[in-house]
Image: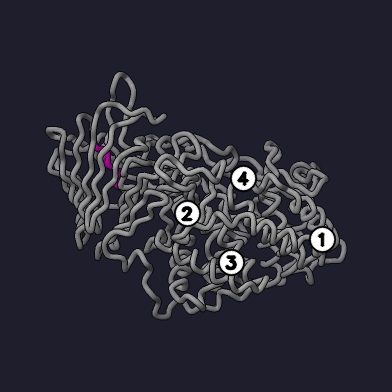
Amino acid sequence: MIEDRCKALLSRWCERLRSLQVTGTGDRRLDGGLLCPACQIMHGRAQDAMYPFLTMASFTNDEKWIESAEALFDWADYNLYLGNGLYLNDVNLEWSGTTVFTTVQLCDCILHHGDILDAGFRKRISERIMASAQALSVYEELKENNINYLLSNALALYEAWMVTGNDRFRDASGEFLESGGDAFLSNGLIAGEGHPREPLSPRGCSPVDIGYNVEETLVSLARLSVLSGDEKLQEKIGHCILAHLDFLLPDGGWDNSFGTRNFKWSYWGSRTSDGSLEMFLTFADKYPVLKTAASRYLGLLEKCTHSDLLAGGPDYDAMGQSPCIHHTFTHAKSLAAVIDNNLGLVDDGESLLSLPRETLRGIKRFENISTYVASGEKYTATVTGSDWRYCECDHTSGGTLSLLYGNASGPVLAAGMRKYWIVEYNNMQIPRLVKHHECVVPRIEAEIGGSIYSSMNDSFARIGVYDDRIDVDGYLASYDGQRSSSKYSFIYHFRRESLTVEVAADNGTFIVPFIAHPDDDVVISEKMLRRKGVTMTSSAEIIFPYGKERIFNMIPGFAAVRADIMLSGGKAVLEFDFS
């Protein structure tokens, strides 16, 4: 049963989080907070662990969880609460928009576990909910921020109405929901992870981030639709969830290789969001394929749990990176919601339907993000030219083969940031003791006039899409988007059992970061690279600058063998065969 797996994983996560709770110092700035071993700080949003702690209290009947939840509440009340209903995101960060998520989890504490709290603690939580909801009901800045805040605030205010009975909050919930109506695109995707949200990019792309959509926005809307009994909203959100399934990979990972906020992409989702599980199971009876999605996704969370914490990527542990607790205490809320709402009563051993990426044949177009999904019988791939820029050196563009996944091999290519830098302090980890922390975007790269120019930087590349082929023509560009006079091209042939890539460039090298876990047996030669389930051959010589030694990038957290394809006469043909 899904519920049994949720309880087992939640227990592991919460026991580890509780072991990191500071007690007995006599200093209110410290006592009750959770100390992150990876970042060596106390993340402000750690208060979110209150709700899963109380879920643990309810199904274990152990008072220690209530004590830990109250200590967290007191810590946040002293260090983060501003006195006007709003909470700081962190003690060293002025942003208070995350009060939306604080309010949701405080409401969940009362709605699901109010009966196990003493009257005094319950009253204090209720007072904070009232004050926070009053502040959120007039928090106009949220309407101009990333869409997940605006639409999740509709849930926060609705739950606050359920707790307090104040009709003003229910009315404000409807207003926030209505103001986010333009975020729903015709193909079911949700736009709005960007500042400002409305303008399209030069290519006509909308600001879409799969990670935030499926782990925050749609989760909030799915719950809101059920709580409110709004059948039209349920129909709308169900359609959106199914549309986003085109980016769920067979192992439960999310393809966010083109997302506007993929600087927080952790393959299973987004680093500071709540998780997809509740969303899947909320609609699983209506859409049975979501049972498959739930089981696969939960399996990936289990696989990425090390030292009883959720790691920021599949190869973090193998590459010596400690897991940040932020991923764990936010995603623990999703497991708790599944348990408290009896959503996990699903037998994941029964015959399950295949996911869309497993059944798609040919190429599916997503023109409003200039992204194309292609699948054969043994693999699935993504090509992107998305040019909506959230920040410097974010996701790739230029017609990049941004993701390649083999049914037998798992991920083969997964393009993260063009250059890793800390966009959100406290929310992204700094790599430690990684010898080769490098870009993992497949790209043509050349040094021109002393600067690096690359295919991944070209926002204006022409992309032609045909029945089983995608053609790309562009110019190598600098990180800030300045195009050179050096042309390049890709021709992707999507065959039933293999993918062929024809590469041409005026100058430069085609760099292929070929994903391989450090324990994977890898075979390399002058024109071949192979591991279990996948073989890459090249018509041109392959140079392995580090031999079999792995490179690594924190986003999305894969280790890889770097293969430099030496473009003979400016050309090469690569073949990816999947066994």
Marks 2/4: CA–CA distance: 17 Å
Q: Main secondary structure of the magenta part?
A: strand
Measured as percent of width and height from the top left, residue 523 is found at: 20, 48
**Label 4 CA crowd tier, 10 Å (few <14, some 14–19, many 20+):** some
Residue 345's place in the image compared with 462, above or below, is below
Q: Which amino acid, by three-letter code, is at mark 1? A: Ser
Q: CA distance from mark 2 to mark 1?
A: 34 Å
Quadrant location of residue 128? Answer: bottom right
- Residue holding disc 3: 222
Q: Earlier in the sequence, mark 3 or mark 1?
A: 1
Type of amino acid under label 2: Ile
Query: According to the image, label 2 marks what residue?
Result: 210
* Residue located beneath label 1 in the image: 126
The residue mark sitting in front, 3 or 1, is 3
- What residue lies at 62% left-to-right and 69% top-to-bottom? 225
CB-based contact (under 8 Å), mark 4 and mark 3: no
Give the structural element (helix, strand or loop) at label 1.
helix
Q: What amino acid is labelled 4 in the image?
A: Asn
Q: Secondary structure at mark 3?
A: helix
Amino acid tagged 3: Ala
Residue 286 lies within the magenta run = no
Residue for badge 4: 145
Instruction: For the residues labelled 2 and 3, say whether their Cβ atoms are less than 8 Å apart.
Output: no
Residue drawn at (80%, 61%) of the image: 168
Residue closer to the observer: 144 or 18: 144
From the top left corner, tell me how far across and down residue 573 is, in percent.
16, 44
Which quadrant of the structure image shows residue 380? Answer: bottom left
Count of marks placed on residues:
4
Q: Is residue 513 magenta?
A: yes
Q: Nearer the viewer, residue 384 or 100?
A: 384
